[in-house]
Image: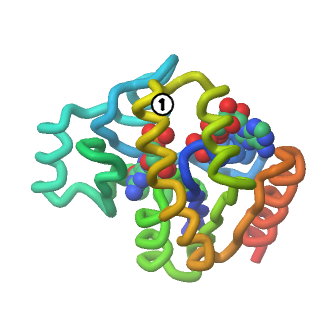
Amino acid sequence: MGKLIIFSAPSGAGKSTIVNYLLSRNLNLQFSISATSRPPRGVEKHGAEYYFLSPEEFRQKIANGEFLEYEEVYTDKFYGTLKTEVERILNSSGNVIFDVDVVGGCNIKKYYGDKALSIFIEPPSVGELRCRLEKRGTDSPEVIEARIAKAEHEMAFAPRFDVVIHNDDLEEAKAKALKAVTDFLEK
Ligand code: ADP
Ligand code: 5GP
């Protein structure tokens, strides 16, 4: 069976950048495409970054027991991992890589135990997160505020993860992530 790599962090810490870097390496990793009820941002496409669902469709899937885990990460914005998505990747002998919030990350780690490596990406400060989100330019000021408001609480989850990577210098953080994942997959 393949292994599972979980990335969590406050929004803007650099998870997607690091996850995309790892996906470009030859590690037999496949991205677990989550479902969400938030609208697509920028060039995001249904079935690539996320499965974009209406709030009604999302609730129906909760009622049907289709999620391995799900969270209301921001008010009225649901995100969840579909069981079928993880099964699809594991059945194809791939290793699964997740980009999920801190609570979802802890839940997936608890569920899979030693088969999973959980990695927390730590930003230099909450102020730096704000700068990165503003520079990224994909979210409205209100959305950025909601993300910043949650960041302090999310930072407190770091000690629950197997590995914490400080993302100040991006190249250094990418190298540390690559080493942690390679070592774990070779174990
Ligand atoms: P997340 O997926 O955690 O929300 P992203 O990967 O989208 O975060 O990164 C947020 C923004 O910060 C992006 O524009 C990205 O290019 C930038 N970024 C990531 N890491 C660094 C870093 N070490 N220094 C400066 N900017 C960074
Ligand atoms: P974004 O809107 O920036 O794409 O994601 C917002 C937050 O939701 C991020 O912390 C991201 O990791 C998290 N997230 C994405 N997919 C899932 C999921 O399937 N489950 C959980 N619990 N969180 C998710």
Residue 147, above or below 62: above
Q: Is the CB atom of the residue marked by disc 1 within 8 angstroms of ligand 2's nearest atom?
A: no
Residue drawn at x 51%, y 17% is: 43
Residue drawn at x 56%, y 58% is: 8
Q: Is residue 129 left or right of residue 31?
A: right
Relative image position of residue 94 (x, y in whole percent): 58, 55
Q: Which residue is mark 1?
A: 48
Relative image position of residue 25 (x, y in whole percent): 78, 44
Q: Is residue 1 left or right of residue 169?
A: left
Relative image position of residue 159 (x, y in whole percent): 62, 78
Judging depth in this view, the residue of 84 and 121 nearest the camera is 121
Mark 1 Cα-neighbour bin, 10 Å: few <14, some 14–19, many ≥20? few
**Total number of numbered discs in the rendering:** 1
One can see residue 59 in this view: yes
One can see residue 92 in this view: no
Name the residue type under label 1. Answer: Ala
Residue drawn at x 42%, y 34% is: 143
Judging depth in this view, the residue of 166 and 118 nearest the camera is 166
Residue drawn at x 37%, y 53% is: 81
Residue 35, above or below 110: above
Residue 38, above or below 180: above
